Image (tube, grey):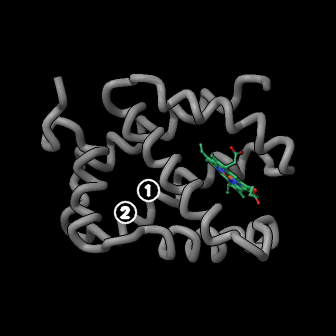
Amino acid sequence: MLMSASSNPIEESFELAAARCADLTPLVYQRLFDQHPETRAMFRTQGSELVKGSMLALTIEAILDLAGERRGHFRLIACEVSSHDAYGTPRELFIAFFAVIRDTLCDLLGDEWSTDIAQAWDALLIEIDAFAAVPA
Ligand code: HEM
């Protein structure tokens, strides 16, 4: 059975953000590049808009699956840890992408960023840390 938005604070945070902003992509990458300037040069110059858009979309799908039904999309996270090792993305940076997404949502939601949502994100980030800590 599908969880209703109100019983799943992570899902709720994305829904509230979607009501305020049609596309999170520019906001997320602006924040990533501000907080971790070295990441700007990691993306290719040609075609990077597509890569960045789909990397974010797949990451969000994995987050929603991890926070919800766990049908399998969440496995992308462990899988990408090893492919990003090959791209030269350090683990801490890989993990930081999830916090960048959380912070982007938090900014967008303003007053609507509830204690429930904050706690659910804290717990999720801890769990994701554990995935990424597993040796590739
Ligand atoms: C700050 C952290 C991250 C950086 C700097 C980064 C960087 C990159 C780069 C440089 C590429 C290759 C682009 C190309 O082919 O030109 C890529 C692809 C990709 N990234 Fe990331 N990434 C980060 C975090 C993540 C996370 C957390 C996920 C999801 C869990 C993810 C999922 C993907 C996917 C699915 C692709 C497509 C190619 C593939 O399957 O490896 N990335 N990323």
Residue 25: percent from left, percent from top: 49, 69
Type of the residue with mark 1 = Arg
- Please identify the quadrant where the N terminus is shown: top left
Which mark, residue 105? 2
Residue 100: percent from left, percent from top: 53, 60
Q: SS at mark 1?
A: helix
Horizontally, residue 28 falls left or right of residue 66, namely right
Horizontally, residue 101 falls left or right of residue 19, namely right
Type of the residue with mark 2 = Leu
Residue 86, quarter of the rendered image: top right
Q: Nearer the viewer, residue 44 or 94?
A: 44
- Please identify the quadrant where the C terminus is shown: top right
Horizontally, residue 123 falls left or right of residue 31, namely left
Task: Work out how far the residue at label 1 is from the one at label 2, CA to CA, in angstroms.
Answer: 5 Å
Q: Residue at x 39, y 44 (%)?
A: 121
Disc 1 residue crowd, few under 14, some 14–19, many 20+, Cα 10 Å: many
Q: SS at mark 2?
A: helix
Q: Which residue is mark 1?
A: 102
